[in-house]
Image (cartoon, rainbow, N blue to C red):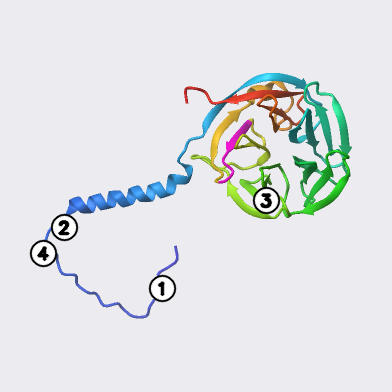
Amino acid sequence: MSKRPNLGYTLPIQKTPMPTQKPNTKHTTTSIIAAVSLALSLCITPYANAAKQLAFEVLKTLPHNSTTFTQGLLVAGDQLIESSGLYGKSFIASYNKETGEQTYKIPLPKRVFAEGLTRINDTLYLLTWKENKLLRFNATTREALTPLSYEGEGWGLTHTDNLFLMTDGSEHLYLRSQKDFRVLKKVKVHDQNKIYRFLNELEYAQGHLWLNVWQTNQILRVNYHTGEVTGILDLTSLQKQNGGNPKQAVLNGIAYDPEHNAYWVTGKYWPKRYLIKISTPVTQ
């Protein structure tokens, strides 16, 4: 708090006449309570709803290359398309989602650290970590197209009908133009208890945004307009099945499969990927 300024003179003191009538304490108390209630409601409104704990059921398990540093995952027809990171090792690969067999692989330049990816029509869009480039590929021919530029780090990427949704490892979700990738809006991802940081791979499906949180076993269900977390999915049981160092073999990768009305999930260096059905327990 700053010091009160020295004005160089003394302010005259005015005596306030004593009231001739006893104040109405009932009305005063009521007014104070109303004011406090209003102030509290204004403070907690954005965080008012508790996020629901979600449940899941494993429908199918497929082998997953345990050397893959999973960054992004999506379903395109009968294919699962995955991006893998690290300098000198980054690539995009496609797999038959029923058998797990690899159908193609796009090696990336050694100077590129691949991150999240999404597909719109016949174009694949791939984020890069610190290269400030959104790489683009023809999804049929795999030919490289002219990239777009952006500032900051790239982590996760998905899209709605008219927007890109992107994360950069912070607490922010970025809503970007599909025309030129400029930022239209950003929101903080939160629930009533906390703000979530290290937001990573993501998927938009069925009116919900699903967000991996780096170095955790949680996937968040989020209202992307407000950033409010409406559900939390804990996949610790799947992470334990995939062993390894939990700080390296982290949960990352979620993709909606409309054929099964379910979601594929996996992690970095996991030997398995899973098709899961997500639900809300009836007790909530």
Specify few, some or many for label 2: CA neighbours under 10 Å numbering under 14, 14-19, or 20 or more.
few
Write down the region rendered in magenta: 218-225
Circles 1 and 4: CB distance less than 8 Å?
A: no
Badge 1 element:
loop
If you read the primary sequence from the N terminus, does the residue marked by circle 3 or circle 1 appear first? 1
Task: Identify the residue under disc 1.
Answer: 5
Residue type at tag 2: Pro
**Foreground disc of the pair 1, 4:** 4
Task: Indicate yes or no whether the magenta region holds residue 221.
Answer: yes
Q: Residue at x 70, y 26 (%)?
A: 259
How many numbered tags mark residues here? 4
Distance from disc 4 to disc 2, alpha carbons, whole Å, reads 9 Å
Secondary structure mostly seen in the magenta stretch: strand
Task: Identify the residue under disc 4.
Answer: 20
Residue type at tag 4: Thr
In the image, taking residue 220 as reference, residue 123 lies left or right, namely right
The relative height of residue 11 versus residue 84 in the rendered view (above or below) is below
On the image, the x and y values in percent for residue 10 come to 31, 78
